[in-house]
Amino acid sequence: MELSDIRREYTRGGLRRNDLPDEPLSLFDKWLKQAVEAKLTDPTAMTVATVDENGQPYQRIVLLKHFDKEGFVFYTNLGSRKALHLSNNAKISLHFPWHGIERQVHITGQAEKLSNLEVMKYFTSRPKESQIAAWASKQSSRLSARQVLEGKFMELKQKFANGEVPVPTFWGGYRVKVNSIEFWQGGANRLHDRFLYSQDGESWDVERLAP
């Protein structure tokens, strides 16, 4: 099998300038709902890209937990590699790969830590096993074996068996304040449609980009 021979046509239709709203969040909301309705696997999964102190980019998959005009929200261990990167460089990139409906969304912005109240409200809404897992995993640190992680999880599960799980001090979240949002719609003959919304004060500039 030659990788260069793997290809497909994009046939679900285009995206036209006249169909775009003045601001991007309503279009993102529409596309996300359509991704959910299409039963895509993990439609809220997004690639989060950060950069270390040497300029080396890193990517990982994180779940979007909320979005509104204030930004896009996700949660993580504050000792994780991504959190350490963001403490030095708050610039961040998000990417939603909705291949099943031939769409992508790319977001750039600045990450800001969520308040303790926001973190507590979300943490207490999680299943208890997920709360315990947050305590068990020192994210991005090296492990000698999986059994170490599983053993820690079982130890904490027993410890918190009869009570509430407190929010770890090393666990929190970020709100990505948006600078730009690009919408990509697959098109026939590789003539894809791309529109870039860029923040301009209280309004948005919209440009069509070549595929």
Image (cartoon, grey):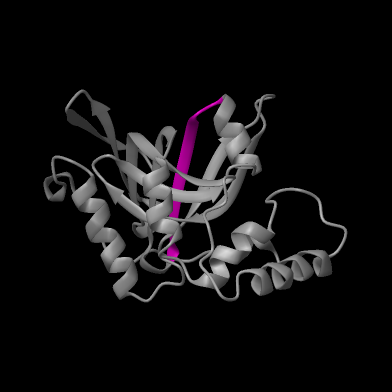
Residue 140 visible within the image: yes
Residue 155: image x %, image y %?
73, 70
Residue lying at 55% horizontally and 55% vertically, measured from the top left: 61
Residue 90: image x %, image y %?
50, 29
Residue lying at 46% horizontally and 72% vertically, measured from the top left: 41
- For the N terminus, which image quadrant? bottom right
Left or right of 25, for residue 99 = right
Q: Is 114 inside the magenta-drawn segment?
A: no
Q: What stretch is highlighted in magenta?
A: 89-99
Relative to 167, residue 41 above or below: below
Residue 6 visible within the image: no
Among the 4 quarters of the image, the one containing residue 36: bottom left
Give 195 or 169, whichever is nearer the viewer.
169
Residue 122: image x %, image y %?
40, 57
Residue lying at 61% horizontally and 33% vertically, measured from the top left: 85
Which residue is outermost to the front? 162
Residue 87: image x %, image y %?
56, 29
Give 73 or 134, whichever is nearer the viewer.
134
